[in-house]
């Protein structure tokens, strides 16, 4: 639980310390790096540290080779090149939605020095927020909201798979609204179809998505082959 509640800054700093130790080891000895090589190595280590801190599942990190998928990713990168962004990836499982969110996040991390990214499931987000009501809770709902607000780009996966309570609806849309107002980038992933997004995203969220993002429909064949 401790690792799960680690802040964006703490996770990035922990991963960066591990990376910097490897860079320092290469500044001495016969194979030491030049200043330019050291700068490039340090930049790459910082990127890898930010990727590690994002906690995307390993299965999402394979680059999918498919023309429609590639075109959709290119479009997403164009959207994410500006300020606040809100994207929704919809479609059945196995179409590469989480993989696209991963590579879109890597794109943002590469473009902006010091950027941070995170992947979270909606169920864990809601569970973490509900836990703030416990008498022994170490964080408030405000703390949890601010923790997710801190990331430059946040992916919320498996949206719409819960009980569909008012608490889930309001919590998700409050977070979306606050991140938009802060100029942050958010990706929502759902196995629902485009017409069912109204059950998880409120009218204000749809309006923001129309202004600075959009919906990507993953309507091609599954990439998961039967054994």
Image: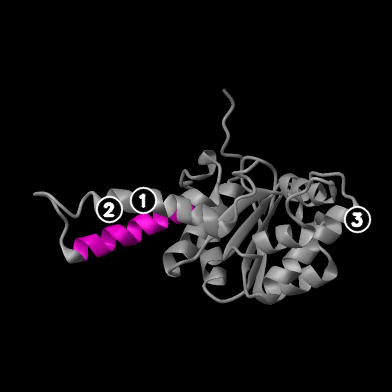
Give x and y (percent) for residue 130.
82, 49
Q: Nearer the viewer, residue 68 or 216?
A: 216
The location of residue 157, given as percent across then percent down, is 68, 49
Q: Position of residue 183 (x, y in %)?
A: 63, 75
Percent of width and height locating residue 199: 86, 56
Mark 2 lies on residue: 23
| Residue at x 29% of width, y 48% of height | 22
* Residue 136 is a magenta residue: no
In the image, which disc is placed on residue 19?
A: 1
Asked if residue 209 shows in the view, the reply is no
Question: Which quadrant of the figure contains the C terminus?
Answer: top right
Q: Which residue is mark 3?
A: 166
Reply above or below: 211 against 195: below
In this view, the mark in front (3 or 1): 1
On the rendered structure, is 225 left or right of 41?
right
Disc nearer the start of the sequence (3/1): 1
Give the Cα separation between the discs numbered 3 and 2: 49 Å
x 69%, y 64%: residue: 146
Q: Looking at the image, is mark 3 or mark 2 earlier in the sequence?
A: 2
Vertical position of residue 9 compared to residue 61: above or below: below
Q: Quick one: label 3, few (<14), some, or many (20+) residues within 10 Å?
A: few
Q: Nearer the viewer, residue 169 or 96?
A: 169
Tag 3, which secondary structure? helix
Q: Which mark is residue 50?
A: none
The one nearer the camera, 7 or 172, is 7
Q: Main secondary structure of the magenta part?
A: helix
Please give the range of residues in magenta: 36-51
Q: CA distance from mark 3 to mark 1?
A: 43 Å
Given contact means CB atoms under 8 Å apart, are the residues at marks 3 and 1 in contact? no
Establish if 58 lies above or below 84. Answer: above
Marks 2 and 1: CB-CB under 8 Å?
yes
Residue at coordinates 47% horizontally, 58% vertically from top-left? Answer: 106
């Amino acid at each position: 639980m401790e690792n799960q509640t680690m802040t964006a800054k703490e996770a990035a700093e922990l991963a960066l310390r591990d990376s910097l130790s490897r860079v320092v080891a290469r500044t001495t000895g016969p194979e030491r790096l030049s200043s330019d090589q050291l700068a490039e190595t340090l930049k790459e280590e910082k990127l890898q540290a930010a990727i590690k801190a994002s906690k995307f599942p390993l299965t999402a990190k394979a680059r999918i080779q498919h023309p429609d998928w590639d075109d959709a990713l290119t479009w997403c990168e164009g959207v994410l090149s500006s300020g606040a962004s809100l994207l929704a990836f919809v479609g059945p499982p196995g179409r590469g939605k989480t993989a696209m969110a991963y590579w879109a996040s890597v794109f943002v991390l590469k473009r902006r020095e010091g950027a941070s990214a995170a992947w979270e499931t909606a169920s864990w987000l809601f569970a973490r927020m509900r836990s703030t009501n416990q008498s022994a809770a170490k964080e408030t709902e405000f703390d949890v909201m601010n923790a997710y607000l801190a990331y430059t780009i946040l992916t919320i996966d498996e949206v719409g798979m819960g009980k569909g309570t008012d608490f889930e609806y309001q919590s998700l849309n409050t977070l979306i609204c606050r991140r938009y107002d802060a100029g942050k980038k958010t990706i929502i992933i759902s196995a629902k179809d485009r017409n069912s997004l109204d059950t998880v995203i409120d009218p204000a969220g749809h309006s923001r998505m129309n202004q600075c993002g959009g919906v990507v429909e993953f309507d091609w064949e599954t990439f998961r082959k039967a054994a």
